[in-house]
Image (cartoon, rainbow, N blue to C red):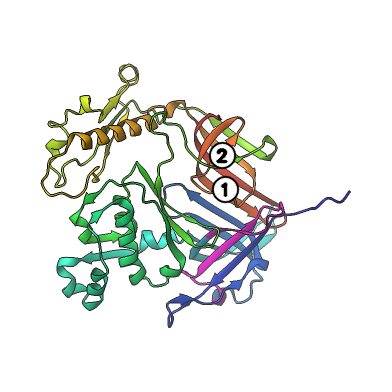
Amino acid sequence: MNVDRFRPDHRVCVRRYHDATNTFAAEVDISADVVSISTSKTYGQVAGGFSLVTTAKLADFWETVTPNDLVTIDLDAGDGTGLRPVLVGQINRLAEALSLDSSGTPRRSFQISGFDLGKILLQHNASWDIARFDQFFGDEFIKRIDQGLQVSGTPSQLIRSVVQTYLHLQVPWTKTWVALDRVEAADDWQTLDYTVAWHEGSVWQVLERLSNRPWNVLHTETGEDGKLHVVLERAPFHDETGRLTRETLHDIPDSHAAAYNLGRDDTERTNWVYFDPQLSVFGAREASIGMLRVVDRGLLSYDEASVHRHGLRGQHVATIFTPFGTRAYEPSEPDEIQKAAARGAAVWNWYRRNHLYRNGQLTVKGSPAYRAGDGIVFGGDQYLVERVAHTYVWGQSYQTTLGVTRGQRHG
């Protein structure tokens, strides 16, 4: 009987930036010199990290690789599915290293580390001020404003506006490598936020503010096309049950597990949630407290018995978004208050059972198919994957470690 045999494999390429075209040059494949690869990505975070170890034989190392070069990492699980993108990023540091092995023999290697392309969202110090554009930015900024830097709209509209109007023009190569095709438009709550018109800090700070957390999750991931995708999606929970909702779940058989530590703990117990939407467009705080009578309206939820035993352990969830449009100075209507109360109840249902869900760490046979934010089924339970870490050593091993939470019986 013929049995197909596979083994894990990898592909690592670097691209040097080309100043004349504002693009990255043709890739240089350094796979043959890569000894080990480590990557890590956390759900809801802007950037993941990577580290590579190469042989000391890599020709012209200091000329081949430089900080901020583009790096693409593909891994093959060894099951015949072939190479799949795991990370596209930029080099942060490269170094020559010397260490001693177990026998005392010196070993030289080169080490390369960095972040995925979320780095540009986090570290690019975005700065704009519409009222003072002539002094700081001149005609170029006028062109950007003419394209429409929105200060009102839904989360997806505002995030698209900031990335396309500012980032793609300020950092031209991001048009090719940073995609916006997964910015969810389902959240129709809106805001009128004039502070979008001026900013000092990273692009990511603006995007997070505009994402309407915790109702939505804003994160980045390397897609199957090898690009970084900015993703805005509905937080994966059912409004009434608080259960995890994922259309697809990776089914992990027991035979694929190399190690795990899964249990329940009390660190994330939540026994009250005050959901604080901005129900007056211009931010009159009495709209949230006196006028709405939050206890009766469902914006304040709590478990009295738990509070008596464990003390208050909860959170104040505030948002600048409202369930209606940007109608100046108009009071909140009853149906809009009901929409806010329904969303407040959903947020409460998402958090209230935290201490009953299993969480921990699961190490399995390596696979590039896993992504932070995925759902998995293991041992009859389903989990949300909050962190994915790949550890690959050429010719020896490939394992993936999943940080999981919200574990509950499947089905």
Q: Which residues are magenta?
A: 63-87
Would residue 263 be counted in the magenta stretch? no
Q: Which residue is mark 1?
A: 370
Q: Quadrant of the C terminus?
A: top right
Circle 2: residue type? Ile
Tag 2 residue: 376
Kindly report the distance in space between the C-alpha atoms of the residues bearing marks 2 and 1: 9 Å
Dot 2 and dot 1 residues touching (CB under 8 Å): yes
Residue located 36% across and 45% down the image: 216
> Badge 1: few (under 14), some or many (20 or more) residues near its Cα, within 10 Å?
many
Q: Is residue 346 above or below residue 230?
A: above
Tell me which residue sits at (34%, 34%) in the image: 347
395 displayed left or right of 109: right
Element assignment for label 2 = strand
Q: Say whether residue 48 is visible.
A: yes
Foreground residue among 224 and 336 = 336
Which residue is found at the position 36% from the left and 47% from the top? 186
Residue closest to the eye, 17 or 22: 22
